[in-house]
Image (cartoon, helix red, strand yellow):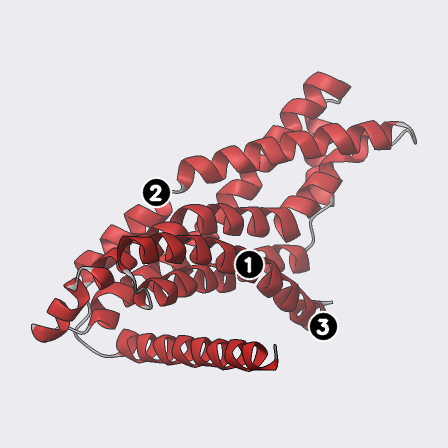
Amino acid sequence: MTGRVQDWVKDAILEVQEYVHLVTKAGRSVLTPPIYYRDIIEQFDAIGIGSLTVVLLAGLFTGMVLALNSGLTLDQFGARSMVGRLISASMVKELGPVLTGLMVAGRVGSGIAAELGSMMVTDQIAALRALGTDPVRKLVVPRVLAGVLMVPLLTVLAGGIGMVGGWIVTVLQFHVASSIYWSSVVQGLYVQDVWMGLIKPFFLGFTIVSIGCHVGMRTTGGTQGVGKSTKLAVVASSVAVIAVDFMVTKVMIVLLY
């Protein structure tokens, strides 16, 4: 049993070391030529536009169910008009970034791990090295840049559509005037909340994409290994989203509040 624990600890330390090495190498590659602009644009489309539908649907229904549940509770205290304030604060500060991160982790993280894993087991990455192309610069950097820049935009859209979903339920279900709802939405937002909702997604996007790239680049064992890497990427990136969300929130509360 002790031997298994030691092996697990060694493997964990090795994975962390390789992850840090990959991130460091990717960081250096961003600042030095050559930069593959066409690949970056393609990843913007794949990660940003490709994830738009699932993120918008998740944000819409989250805002609707949040309005439904919170409205029923607030109605007991005669505070039906406060639904908008609760929804805006929740979607901007927490639910928007986290839900967007989880949706992107499920769609993009798994896709990156499967794509890079397939390239690993079919020796395509070895072929890139043989041709003198750096796989990190060619494959990892465009995905990391796309994740860091597109996840914040998706988060803003998710938060906005969530408020719209809450407005639909509040007006139709609880018969609150639209002007009262949107006034409550504005009253529930503070500058610190907006900054928190905008800064978090940068860290979440980087975490999701870098973990997907790391897992994909470490794939071995043929097609079965690709399946394992895909599953690992989704689980690891989803857990990392929640953990990073907590750590960033803790730091920003100290800095902003």
CA gap, disc 1 and disc 3 = 20 Å
Kindly identify which residue carries mark 2: 49
For the residues carrying marks 2 and 1, which lies nearer the camera in this image?
1
Residue 240 image position (x, y, % from top left)? 55, 62
Question: What amino acid does circle 1 point to?
Answer: Val
Image x and y of residue 62, in percent: 62, 35
Q: Quadrant of the N terminus?
A: bottom right
Q: Residue at x 47, y 77 (%)?
A: 11
Label pair 1/3, CB-CB below 8 angstroms: no
Give the secondary structure at mark 2: helix
Mark 3 Cα-neighbour bin, 10 Å: few <14, some 14–19, many ≥20 = few
The mark nearer the N terminus, 1 or 3, is: 1
Q: Nearer the viewer, residue 159 or 215?
A: 215
Q: Residue at x 38, y 58 (%)?
A: 229
Look at mark 3 in the image and give the residue it sits on. 254
- Residue at image x 21%, y 58%? 39
Task: Give the residue pinned by disc 1.
Answer: 241
Residue at the extreme left of the image, as rendered: 131
Residue 118 visible: yes
Tell me if 111 is positioned left or right of 138 in this view. Answer: right
* In this rendering, the label closer to the viewer, 3 or 2: 2
The three-letter amino acid code for the residue at tag 3 is: Val
